[in-house]
Amino acid sequence: MTFRVAILGAGPSGLAQLRAFEAARDAGADIPEIVCYEKQSDWGGMWNYTWRTGLDAYGEPVHGSMYRYLWSNGPKECLEFADYSFEEHFGRSIPSYPPRAVLRDYIMGRVAKSNMRQHIRCNQDLNARHCPAPVGQGSVCYQRKK
């Protein structure tokens, strides 16, 4: 049986996990088959901003906890990817509490610098998961939004 990994969500945490697998592969490790299921049409997780409310084009509720002019309430140093600094991305030092758009740009830059995109499946709605007692056995049911 082939070992497979499902990552739920392509926000900063899901992207960090994808990057960890990518780094392990680059170091010569044999990594499992990986698929990251993202409900939205783009990666970035909560940092994706939309003005839309109500239902999306697929009849699903729009969940948006961001607003246009949001600023981070935590220092960027706590949000930084271990192998990709804000200074590397922007080419200079930036303030510790950046606005939402700056954080999203940084996250998008990290994705662009890697091969993570090949593992991300956008517009995938997770319907169910089943994790029985034996480790290594389970299933994920998803549906591509049409």
Image: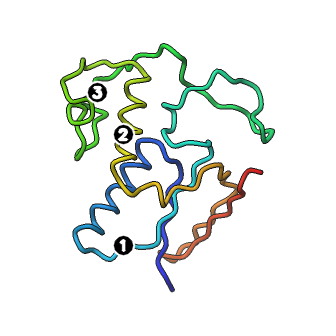
Instruction: Tell me the amino acid under the disc marked 1.
Output: Ile
Which residue position is annotated with label 3? 76
Residue 73 in the image, given as x and y percentages of width and height:
37, 19
Residue depicted at 69% across the width and 31% down the height: 62
The amino acid on which the numbered mark 3 sits, given as a three-letter code, is Lys
In the rendered structure, the answer to whether residue 76 lies left or right of residue 87 reads right
Task: State the residue position of label 2.
Answer: 109
- Closer to the eye: label 2 or 3: 2
CA gap, disc 3 and disc 1: 30 Å
Look at the numbered disc 3 and give the secondary structure of its residue. helix
Reading the image, the residue beneath label 1 is 31
Please state the horizontal and vertical placement of residue 48, each as a whole percent of the image.
Answer: 53, 31
Distance of label 2 from label 1 (alpha carbons): 24 Å
Whichever of labels 3 and 1 marks the residue nearer the N terminus, that label is 1
Report the residue at 39% width, 56% height from top: 18
Q: Quick one: 144 or 91, which is closer to the camera?
A: 91
Q: How crowded is mark 2: few (under 14 residues within 10 Å), some or many (20 or more)?
A: some
